[in-house]
Structures are given as structure tokens and as C-alpha cells.
Image: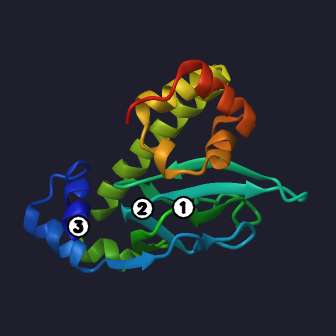
Amino acid sequence: MKQILINYMKRYSDLSEAELNNMASDVTITPFQKGTVLLQQGETPEQCYFILKGCIRKYTVSESGKETTVNFYTEEQSVTIFNQHGDDQVSKYSLGCVEDCVLVVGDLLIGQDAYDKSPGLETMILKMVESDMGGMHDDFAAFISSTPEERYQSLIEKRPELLKRVPQHQLASYLGMTPESLSRIKKRLGSPRI
């Protein structure tokens, strides 16, 4: 499993295989069962995650109890709630395991000693965050400028595996529509072959 992490780190670093192996030897890998809530909305985030296996949902719950899915994260994606910029540093989101997961669990507040121990770690993390942020901005811009049908077609093109891995009501929420609207779009467009 650690090789998945090492291969991911290679994309953002020019460190040697030995240096990457050394970094990976310090990580904690933990299994979580489907349904596990990793972070509850209103808690202060202390950990970040990298998915080796499984799917995590990022969502909010309104005062009336309505859940809104913000994103899904799957294999070889990092999951972090950054909120150190606000006065109140509690999370506006919850993170839950949609499937059984195997995750690298990291401390959100990496100390200087970790950077001293692993030269190149800080630069690699910065590149990873920049890549994640760039992708999120592109996805958000596409989302707000598209129709529900276009969002569904984009999902089929970019992340078709979610259609089989995620409950329809969560998928509909993620696409900004009701489950009934999603059913109508699927019926009209036909089911994709995955």
C-alpha cells in the first residue's frame, strides 16, 4: 500500500526513491469502516488524509438537517480541511467514509522538525496543495457555469466510477439537483457503460 503513496509523491518531487521510501516509512496507515465519520462539522480539524483505498465524502448539514455533498475523494487523492484563516477554526464540513477505506493519516500541523528531518517535504506538500487548489478552482468554475445535465455528463467523462460507488441521493446533492432530477437525466441520456 505504501507504494501507492510513494508513486503519488513522485509526481510532486524530484527526491530519490530512497528518500521517498524514508518519508513513507514514517506514515500511519489506518483502515476505516464504511460509515465512519472522520471529522464532524463544528470540530477543529487536526488530521489530513491520503486515500489508498476507498471513497470519502465531504458534506455539510444545515440547521434543519439537510445534507449537501460538496465533494467525493477516491484513491490517490488527499483530503484536508484548511481553516486556519478564520477566527473560528472549526470545520464547516464533515468527512465520512462512503466505503471501507485505507488511509494515510497525517497531522495537519506538521512541525518544523518534520521538515528538517525530510528535506524536500515542504516543497512537495506545497506543490500538492497548489495542484489540489487549481483543480478545485477549475471544477468550481465549470460547476457554476453548467446546467445540471452538463454536470452529469462531465461526471460521466471525468469520474464515472462514482456512479457505482456512491448512493444516488449523495450523487444528486453533489451535482446540485434532487435525486428525482438525476433519475430523469439518467433516463433521458441513458446509463453509461462503466
According to the image, label 2 marks what residue? 54
Could you tell me which secondary element the residue under label 1 belongs to? loop
**Residue at image x 38%, y 75%?**
112
Instruction: Tell me which corner region of the image, top left, top right, bottom left or bottom right, holds residue 117.
Output: bottom left
Circle 3 SS class: loop
Give the class, few, some or many, for how many residues have Cα within 10 Å of label 2's Cα (few <14, many ≥20): many
Q: Is residue 142 visible?
A: no
For the residues labelled 2 and 3, the Cα–Cα distance comes to 30 Å
Tell me the distance, in whole angstroms, between the alpha carbons under discs 1 and 2.
Answer: 8 Å
- Depth check, front residue: 53 or 15: 53
The answer to whether any part of residue 86 appears in the image is: yes
- Do the numbered discs 2 and 3 sit on residues whose CB atoms are within 8 Å? no
Question: Could you tell me if the residues under marks 1 and 2 are in contact, i.e. CB atoms within 8 Å?
Answer: yes
Give percent across and percent down for residue 128.
37, 51
Which residue, given by chain and number where applicable, does mark 3 sit on?
A: 119
Q: Secondary structure at mark 2?
A: loop
Rendered position, 67 above or below 194: below
| Viewer-nearest of discs 2 and 3 | 2
Left or right of residue 85: residue 154: left
| Of residues 27 and 32, the one drawn nearer to the viewer in this rendering | 32
Identify the image quadrant of the C terminus.
Answer: top left
Q: Residues within 10 Å of mark 1 (few under 14, many from 20)?
A: many
The residue most toward the right is 64
Residue 54, compared with residue 134, is above or below; it is: below
* Residue type beneath disc 2: Gly
- The number of numbered discs placed on residues in the rendered structure image is 3
- How far, Cα to Cα, is label 1 from label 3? 35 Å
Which quadrant of the structure image shows residue 77?
bottom left
Question: Mark 2 vs mark 3: which is more N-terminal?
Answer: 2
Which residue was labeled with disc 1?
A: 98
